[in-house]
Amino acid sequence: MRHPTSPASGHSATSSGEPPAAPPRRPGRPARRRTGRTATGLTAGLAAGLLLAAAAACGGGTTSGGGSGSSKTLTYWASNQGADIAADQRVLKPELAKFEKRTGIKVRLEVVPWTDLLNRILAATTSGQGPDVLNIGNTWSASLQATGGLMPFDAKAMGEIGGAQRFVPAALASAGAKGKDPAAVPLYSTAYGLYYNKKMFADAKLDPPKTWQEMVDDGHKLTKGGVHGIAIEGASIPENVHAAFNIGQMYGADFFTPDGKPQFATSQAVAAIKSYLGLLGIEKIAAAGNAEYSANQSINDFATRKAAMLMWQTTTSGFTNLGMKPGEWGVVPIPAPSPAPPGGRPITSMVGGINLAVFKSTGNRDGALEFVKFMTGDDEQKILNKAYGSLPPVTAAQNDPAFDTPDTRVFKGILAGHAAPLPQVPSESQFETAVGTAMKELFADAAAGRPITDDKIRSKLEAAQQQMAE
Amino acid sequence: MTSAHVSSGSGVSSGANVSSGTAREGRAGGPRHGRPPASRNRPRSRFRLPPRLLPYLLLAPAVVAELIVHVVPIAVGIWMSFRELTLFYIRDWAKAPGKGFGNYRVAVDFDAAIGKDLLTSFLVTAGVTVLAVGLSWLLGTAAAILMQDRFRGRGLLRAAFLIPYALPVYAAVMTWGFLFQRDTGMVNHVLADQLHLTGGDRPFWLIGGNGFWALVTVIVWRSWPFAFLVLMAGLQNVPRDLYEASALDGAGVWRQVRHITLPALRPINQVLVLVLFLWTFNDFNTPFVLFGKAPPTGGDLISLHIYRASFLTWNFGTGSAMSVLLLLFLLLVTAVYLIATSRRRSAHA
């Protein structure tokens, strides 16, 4: 599973044609003077063309998709959950065929890469031309809810799909702002854990760490030669901000006030972020080069035994695709500092995952809800979450033996009592971008050997917060 | 066919010639312009356009296209810059509340974070542009002059020089991204492992301060072939006898370059430098593909910065205001540049 919950989880290396703001590479048709006596006319024409095109680039995104008006078809945008788009199509196509057979409704599937998904949704919201049903990263829920582009799951709609009580409460809590009807329903659930390489731990006669300090100590013992204790995705905005949240919870950090105002630079947040940066900058149990990682190189380092530990969201295929065999790794909750800092919470992970939403401009509300009901039904939940290595957010589906492996038992425990949703406020996606970017810059500083101080972290967080001031 | 038809036809055949075309047509119009001689027995269509309108009609598709592609988006962009177009309003964006000059005030408030970042990005962009345009021009000129004389393999070399310009941007810049990786990249392999220039250290190129130099390198690599191509074409027009004559008078290569080649290339350089400037200043693809959505400060070109300010924070009003400011700045620079260079040239002439 790739970064299932983040607006910016794409990385430059794979991003393909982003629609907006690309400046022109060629001038428009130059207006030509009849005689061509001087170059000035030509120049002016070129310049005008370029400037016009440049200004045009500030327009909105592209229009795409197109809700189907007919009651017999639906357009569904799926997020990219598998190793690639084709893998998703292999998983989803048979299920959609099942749905068509059952209801007579044909579902047109489009798997949208993470790099494009949020921009596509924004464009669809602006134009009203979009899919009928779509996947969203669950952390976007409140932001997208605020745009009014998604159909709220009020009591009636919720009743039509089987009722809110079917879902794991923590997962449903990450489907929209508190006190409002959910903007979506949970589809796949994940949580963060600390993955460790069993053989490397056994060779060093170590047990998996239970406290933050044990993790650091183990890391030191495992760091030698080309091997490091832990791998970190230091240039990835979503991974950074997720770590800030997970560890922030242990320190009692709140990035938003109860009434939704940003407050990034609290002393708790500074302490949490410092301990995370310190793995690379102070303890040096992560390689300096990790500060540049944003294309899942840290999974690669873990799977190829260049690092012994990795904080990551629930995954199986992420490792097996890179040659690891199930059983070679183990997972424990991300260890918390001990004794717990004042105000710290017994939370070790965000509630990660994917939500399923209905686009408000759909011309086929009933069919869309029918499809949501199908996808969140017990049978489909088992099939789909098994295929993707995630956990079903539907309580009844969790009882399947497939979700009773050592890994999933750990994650079920985390999600049941030690996970909290990222702040469900409209400006959540800005928060991810601002804080994730600030941490990327701090990692760059740390990797260059400059000291990490509380003041530096605080001022970066303050600057990040000011960008939100609007 | 009457003369009016002929003249109007030639008038539109070369876009900007319309004025002369219509003028002539005006003269040709009037009572003289009736039915064709009766010897033509093919029936005319019932409806006849006033000949005055024809050129405009023929131009209309281009005008409509221009409106749709350029003018309307600009107008919308300018409109957006005066609105509070945040995520709360994008669904019904026509109803976004007005904000007066609020977005502009935020953009140019250099004491606050948003304005300060915009200013930094502007200065970085100016620095990158000056360096990249200067180096591209220098390399292009040098290569064009060196390739002027015939020698074995000249065609091959010329073609090779043009490869960076011909490659798709994304593929090329992604490759540079791999080259610049700290641990596995070719650049550090050569600098640190082979040449030992970095004192045992492996510098970062894609994060931190070196991002500036990585970006300049890639932009120069991408744009100097264009300079080379244009200047090479320009050099074809410099008469060879000038060189021969000057050689007889005892001028060396350097003197020839200074007193024959460069003055002859002047009009071309005027356009070339302006185009390179605008392309580099507006460059979005290169930093975006190289650094992703969170570039280091030294690689935060202004187009990418504006994209981040609007698309990643969903604040399209502020982003539009920044775009409009950028547009005004580029218009100003272009106007000043054209006036200055044209005046200087007429003074020379």
Image (tube, helix red, strand yellow):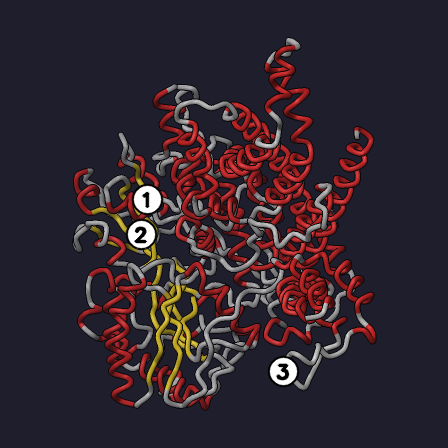
Observer able to see residue A445: no
Q: Quadrant of the N terminus of chain B?
A: bottom right
Along the viewing direction, whichever of B326 and A191 lies nearer the viewer = B326
Q: Is residue A208 above or below residue B98?
A: above
Residues under numbered marks 1 and 2 in contact, where contact means CB atoms less than 8 Å apart: yes
Q: Which residue is mark 3?
A: B41
Along the viewing direction, whichever of B98 and B227 lies nearer the viewer = B227
- Amino acid identity at mark 1: Met
Residue for point 26% across, 30% down: A225
Check if mark 3 and mark 2 are on a common chain: no
| Quarter holding residue B134 | top right
Q: Is residue B340 left or right of residue B84?
A: right
Q: Position of residue B164 (x, y in %)?
A: 45, 39
Q: Which residue is mark 2?
A: A194
Q: Position of residue A142 (x, y in %)?
A: 52, 70
Q: Is residue A116 above or below residue B257?
A: below
Q: Which residue is mark 1?
A: A215
* Alpha carbon separation for disc pair 1 and 3: 99 Å
Along the viewing direction, whichever of A449 and B258 lies nearer the viewer = B258
Observer able to see residue B251: yes
Which chain letter goes with mark 3? B
